[in-house]
Image (tube, coloured by chain):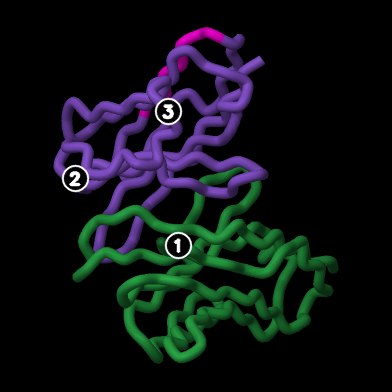
């Protein structure tokens, strides 16, 4: 079955540091890949997505590139802020053509940014 | 739009009691998902509906769990009887544009 593996947390960085959160996946088809963010006490919010190989998703300074050859979708940001402190989830969907299908999530990585 | 609405936000109950969680998806969204989040298991898909019809309930842990979607604007997840191991945060999500799920704020369930 499908699975997503992401680096264990918590990850603690200083403000303005470079961020990488690793994510690799296993899927039977050609999945779409996502990063969701969860702030304390809130539900998940879509941060970025990529639907095919070599696509780069980007939002709010975060980027991730869909690498089919390494089955990876690592999240990066060049300069993190305290407000980026949250839990980040890598996820995939096998739905074809954007149709409805449940997401398979990684365990989440808790990111802590210190001033 | 108010987004996906879940109620209650917090529920504390005793073992053996029935628990009903509610969800109102975003208007116009025709797919709805229930997830459970725990520290041990992370986020798990329990069940999802397309056009009010359950499509995949393979994630429902056991017969104590049931979900319904009587119309396009309302869904329930029921646990009867509840057990302490059901304690978790339960999220509802609905799908908008291609590939994008919108999540509700969740219901934090504690079973004593």
Residue B38 visible here: yes
Residue A14: x and y in percent read: 83, 74
Q: Nearer the viewer, mark 2 or mark 1?
A: 2
Chain ID, purple in image = B
Q: CA distance from mark 2 to mark 3?
A: 21 Å
Q: Is residue A108 above or below residue A32?
A: above
- Work out which quarter of the rendered image holds the C terminus of chain B and state it: top right
Q: Chain ID for label 2?
A: B
Is label 2 in contact with label 1 (beta carbons under 8 Å)? no
* SS state under label 1: strand
Q: CA distance from mark 2 to mark 1?
A: 21 Å
Chain ID, green in image = A
Residue A11, located in which quarter of the rendered image? bottom right
Residue B2 visible here: no
- Work out which quarter of the rendered image holds the N terminus of chain B and state it: top left
Residue B105: x and y in percent read: 49, 40
Residue B57, located in which quarter of the rendered image? top left
Label of residue B62 in the image: 3
Residue at image position (58%, 54%) is: A38
Residue where numbered disc 1 is placed: A46
Label of residue B50 in the image: 2
Residue at image position (31%, 66%) is: A94
Instruction: Give the tally of numbered discs.
Output: 3
Q: Nearer the viewer, mark 2 or mark 3?
A: 3
Horizontal side, residue B109 vs residue B78: left or right: right
Residue at image position (67%, 66%) is: A84
């Amino acid at each position: 079955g499908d699975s997503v593996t992401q680096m264990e947390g918590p990850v603690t960085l200083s403000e303005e540091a470079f961020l990488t959160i690793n994510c690799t996946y296993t899927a039977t088809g050609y999945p779409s890949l996502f990063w969701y963010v969860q702030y304390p006490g809130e539900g998940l919010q879509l941060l970025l997505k990529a639907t095919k190989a070599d696509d780069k998703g980007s939002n709010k300074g975060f980027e991730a590139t869909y690498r089919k050859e390494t089955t990876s979708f690592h999240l990066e940001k060049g300069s993190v802020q305290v407000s980026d402190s949250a839990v980040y989830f890598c996820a995939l969907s096998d739905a074809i053509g954007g149709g409805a299908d449940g997401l398979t999530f990684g365990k989440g990585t808790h990111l802590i940014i210190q001033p | 739009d108010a987004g996906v609405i879940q109620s209650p936000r917090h529920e504390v109950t005793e073992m053996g009691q029935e628990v009903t969680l509610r969800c109102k998806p975003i208007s116009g969204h025709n797919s709805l998902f229930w997830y459970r989040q725990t520290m041990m298991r992370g986020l798990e898909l329990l069940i999802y509906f397309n056009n009010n019809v359950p499509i995949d309930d393979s994630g429902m842990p056991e017969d104590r769990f049931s979900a319904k979607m009587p119309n396009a604007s309302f869904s329930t997840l029921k646990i009867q009887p509840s057990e302490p191991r059901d304690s978790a945060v339960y999220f509802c999500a609905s799908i908008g544009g291609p590939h994008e799920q919108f999540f509700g704020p969740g219901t934090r369930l504690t079973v004593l």
